[in-house]
Amino acid sequence: MKKLNDDQLNELQKDLDAIRDEVLADLGERDANYIRKIIRLHRTLEIGGRVMMPFGFIPPVFVAATASLGIAKILENMEIGHNVMHGQYDWMNDPSLNSQTYEWDTACSSDSWRRTHNYEHHTYTNIIGKDRDYGYAVLRLSDEERWKPRHSLQFINYVLLSTLFQWGVGLHELETEKLTRREIRLRDKIPFLKDFARKGGRQAFKDYVFFPLLTLPVAPIVLAGNVGANLIRNLWASTVIFCGHFTQDAETFSEEECEGESKGHWYLRQLTGSSNFTGGKWLHVLSGHLSYQVEHHVFPDLPAHRYPEISEKVQAVCKKHDIPYNTGTFAKQYGTVLSRIARYSLPDSLRTRLEGKRELQAI
Amino acid sequence: MLARISNTKALHWLGRQLLNRDNPAAWLDPLAETINPMWVQEYTPARVERIVAETLDTKTFVLTPAKRWAGFKAGQHVNICTDVNGIRRTRTFSLSSSPLLWESQGQITLTIKRLPGGLITNWLHDSLEEGDVIGLTEAFGDFLIPEPAKPLLYIAGGSGITPILSQLETMAAEDYRAPVTLLYFVRTQNDVIAREALTALAERWPALTLYIIATDEDQAPRYLKDSDLESVAGLKARQVYLCGPKGLMDLANDLLDKRGVKESQIHSTFFAPPAQAQLDRGQLGGEVTFTRSDLNVGSEGDACLLEIAEAAGLKPQHGCRMGICHQCSCRKTSGTVVNRLTGKVSGPGEETVQLCVSVPQGAVVLDV
């Protein structure tokens, strides 16, 4: 990890705080109009998808309906739900956009998400052993975790996790790895499991029972389309999130180096532990602007559509302090994620030998 | 249509399951708002029909609320909500029309004075136009006409006349039989709100005795004095209703007490303009009320709300304790807080605050 002394960290904090203050002072109607525009788009796509779905016996309509509902779910989860729950729009004082009461369209309950994501992941970002989002306790992605034989098949785990992503995220707080290590008891997780059953049940009821039954003669088509829409969202959300912290150059940290850290050190960790990807406007919107993961981690509660605007300023700060700014095309970044999952599935001796060979070839 | 849906319990339950929200009818609001803002379900929309200038700094807004609004009693208030520069703002105003107008024509009026430096009153005066739509809550307040009829004395100052206008109109229409006296204090004769309505009332309704007193027209200010009360027949038997600036209310309470009017006979209401908070470490701290926990504690210096809550034995939800994760965000129902990180001072009204970085500045009430 890039090392800065206390003065440099304070300077870094001041520079980033200045960017943040500038945006905060400028928040207003433009941001309100933006999020309401996205909400209108979401409502339109969801209604469009649900209405078209029963006519899915016509193949192009099926594709359009599934895509429409899938994109609606992506927008709701990523650009609306995730960002609203970060408190990005709390300043609007609109009860339907309140970080503490918003409930999103996915199996994970918002309360659980706020604990595991907003608090744990954003506070302890990429600290191995504390940030449970790093590998989601099913993938080994760093040599700070010891290799075990089960890791050799982790690519299958990755595909399964991506496919069933909403259920994986929903069950994240169960902390199965701690249960198997007997650090916690299942009994303590009963309140969580009740919440999960309620929210997950509600989601499954809606997409897999209610809407198919409502259109009984074509129930299988509606069921298939709803499964498809959820799958599209699952794969996309998982891919975007993996690109945020598991790329080649995204750094990891140990608990010791972060003990009693300053805000400046926290900023440094967010900058070096996150990675962006580039693309067109709609790629950014559909990723909930998590394509600007660096900016998001530095300023998780600034409205996300502002990240493209402040990106240059963040890059200038990185340059000034000689901190790497991790970005690349979507394909390149995702490629390094897949490679990381594959490489760390190997025992370290084999991995380093292969990596050594590749480096030699490169020379 | 959606309102009717949400009235049925089963459909409401279904709506919650399908739309993941406690007010499923409001799910379509963002779309409805752009088509017809009167279709919004989250609050009761009210269309501005007419805007009437009362004085140089006071206007009456004639509103038509959506039909589902539940109505009000004379003397009650409503919260209005409106987005100003992207921020939902809520303010309380007294209804100045009689409930009879709502019952017969579906209209209500708010009579609003421009407050110097006031964000919302100035916005209402400068930016709100006929045809615009604002949000309303249901009416509330216990500043009500006594039943059965009792002799009354009103002492009003400035825009404090507004709830009294509603009551006088109502009593006149119902031919209220007990004597009613109104002492209405204004700065100058140009500042009289609803002068025509008041004189017309006094003419057609013999029970009403009306005095309009200008305080600032002579060299020496002409405030409420004992002789004003002396001229009110049967004062000790009257219910007294006070509505006006703090100075007038204090003076009135004092003089009434000396004349032997009991505290239980006096009813007062008024919404003071928001105090302009100043950032000064010496002014930080104050009494914090946690309404849900029914707890009241004092605080000093720059202790944040989270620390104050924990010191009081509460365990509010929280996370990073550094203003990042918003785990501790909750509703502040009143009072002013200073953001520990930015030094920014909040508004006095209801809004969401982060407990871990908010320091009270004076009394604060939290929904915790």
Image (cartoon, rainbow, N blue to C red):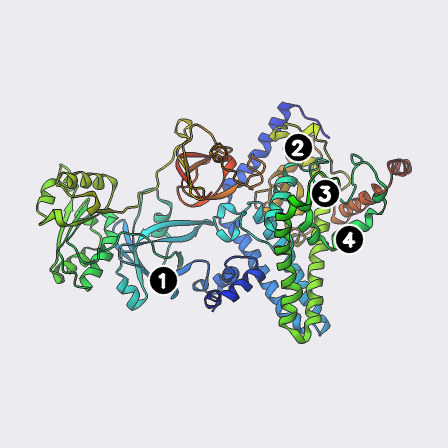
Residue B293: % across, % down: 45, 42
Are labels 2 and 1 on one chain? Answer: no
Q: CA distance from mark 4 to mark 3?
A: 21 Å
Question: Foreground mark, 3 or 1?
Answer: 3
Amino acid type, residue under disc 3 in the picture = Leu
Q: Which residue is mark 2?
A: A268
Amino acid type, residue under disc 2 in the picture = Leu
Look at the numbered discs 2 and 4 and tell me whether their residues touch, using CB distance below 8 Å. Answer: no
Q: Which residue is mark 4?
A: A160
Look at the numbered discs 4 and 1 and tell me whether their residues touch, using CB distance below 8 Å. Answer: no
Residue sitting at x 62%, y 52%: A194
Q: Is B211 situated left or right of B124 in this image?
A: left
Q: CA distance from mark 3 to mark 1?
A: 54 Å
Instruction: Say which of B118 and B103 sits in front.
Output: B103
Are labels 4 and 1 on one chain? Answer: no
Q: Is residue A266 above or below residue A95?
A: above
Q: CA distance from mark 2 to mark 1?
A: 55 Å
Q: CA distance from mark 4 to mark 1?
A: 53 Å
Badge number at residue A179? 3
Q: To which quarter of the image does residue A138 belong?
A: top right
> Which element carries disc 4, helix, strand or loop?
helix
Badge number at residue B70? 1
Label 4: chain letter = A
